[in-house]
């Protein structure tokens, strides 16, 4: 792509990455979550693939595909953690440990990051899965038909 | 003959859609709201999450998210299978 596109994407990519990370990390407090934030980060991957066309994205695909399996496995393991009661039981919520704090007050409040039990962990797992999955799909589609793909 | 058949089907479909939009239920008044009330009132104490939507998606209805993740996984596997490099 041209110099203009490359310069603009150099400026936009870190901002969009930070926004995607924010959406994933605050999934239990603000609108959004793992799927949405992962899609934002995957759109950064698409932007970079379009702007900086080269064969080195092939290596990224081999990194991203195992990461997708890792995210899926983390999500399933987190779901199995609650199997003492039911599948998908939120065992960490309100327990006082990691992410175990109760909400600051009932009703509308700004919220605290250290709440909601397994929800943030599941958001991270799903976010990793969506980033890696959509990113590798974008890279695979961009490599399709190339000589070195 | 065929044309009349399709015209009749179009009329029936249009009638259904028109009727559905005329006798639409008023906005914000579902017929039963016990479950909505339960989620809104108990999500903050049970799941300790401010975002009730996330509490439903990842806790109360986690199976839904598991299915969603499976759909994404299947899509990625399909793309990898279709676009893989075949050795001759």
Image (cartoon, coloured by chain):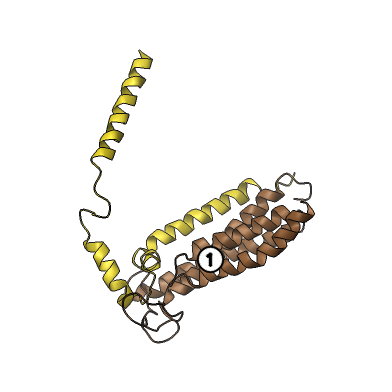
The quarter holding residue A68 reads bottom right
- Asked if residue A48 lies left or right of residue B58, the reply is right
Question: In the displayed image of the protein, which residue is found farthest to the top?
Answer: B1
Classed neighbour count for the residue bearing mark 1: other residues with Cα under 10 Å, few (<14), some (14–19), many (≥20): many
Q: Nearer the viewer, residue B67 or A40?
A: A40
Above or below, comparing residue A44 to residue B3 in the picture? below
B43 sits left or right of B70 in the view = left
**Residue A97, percent across and down?**
42, 86
The reply to whether residue B20 is in sight is yes
Residue A57: name its quadrant: bottom right
Rendered residue at 33%/18% (across/down) = B5
Give how far across and how far down residue A132 sits, in percent: 60, 62
Height in image: A30 above or below B8? below
Would residue A132 be seen by someone viewing this image from the given angle? no
**Chain identifier, yellow in the render:** B
Picture coordinates of residue B58 (x, y %)?
40, 67
Query: Could you tell me which residue is drawn at 72 percent across and 63 percent down?
Result: A10
Foreground residue among A115 and A71 = A115
Tell how many labels: 1
Q: Is residue A87 above or below residue A44?
A: below
User: Pointer 1 indicates a residue of which chain?
Assistant: A
Tint applied to chain A in the drawing: brown
Residue A91 x %, y %? 37, 78
* Rendered residue at 27%/51% (across/down): B27
Q: Secondary structure at mark 1?
A: helix
Above or below residue A42? Residue A114 is below
Q: Which residue is mark 1?
A: A127
């Amino acid at each position: 792509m041209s110099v203009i596109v490359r310069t603009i994407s150099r400026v936009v990519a870190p901002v969009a990455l930070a926004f995607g990370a924010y959406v994933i990390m605050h999934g239990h407090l603000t609108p959004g979550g793992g799927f949405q934030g992962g899609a934002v980060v995957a759109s950064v991957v698409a932007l970079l693939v379009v702007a900086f066309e080269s064969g080195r994205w092939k290596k990224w695909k081999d990194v991203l595909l195992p990461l997708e399996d890792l995210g899926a496995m983390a999500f399933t393991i987190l779901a199995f953690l609650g199997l003492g009661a039911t599948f998908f039981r939120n065992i960490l919520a309100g327990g006082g440990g990691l992410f175990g704090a109760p909400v600051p007050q009932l009703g509308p409040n700004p919220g605290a990051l250290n709440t909601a039990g397994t929800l943030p962990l599941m958001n991270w797992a799903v976010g990793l899965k969506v980033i890696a999955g959509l990113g590798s799909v974008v890279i695979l589609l961009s490599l399709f038909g190339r000589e070195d793909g | 003959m065929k044309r009349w058949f399709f015209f009749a089907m179009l009329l029936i479909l249009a009638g259904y859609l028109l009727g559905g939009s005329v006798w639409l239920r008023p906005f914000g008044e579902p017929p039963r709201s016990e479950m909505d009330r339960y989620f809104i009132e108990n999500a903050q104490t049970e799941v300790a999450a401010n975002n009730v939507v996330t509490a439903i998606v990842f806790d109360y209805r986690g199976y839904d998210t598991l299915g969603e993740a499976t759909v994404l996984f299947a899509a990625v596997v399909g793309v990898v299978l279709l676009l893989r490099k075949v050795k001759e």
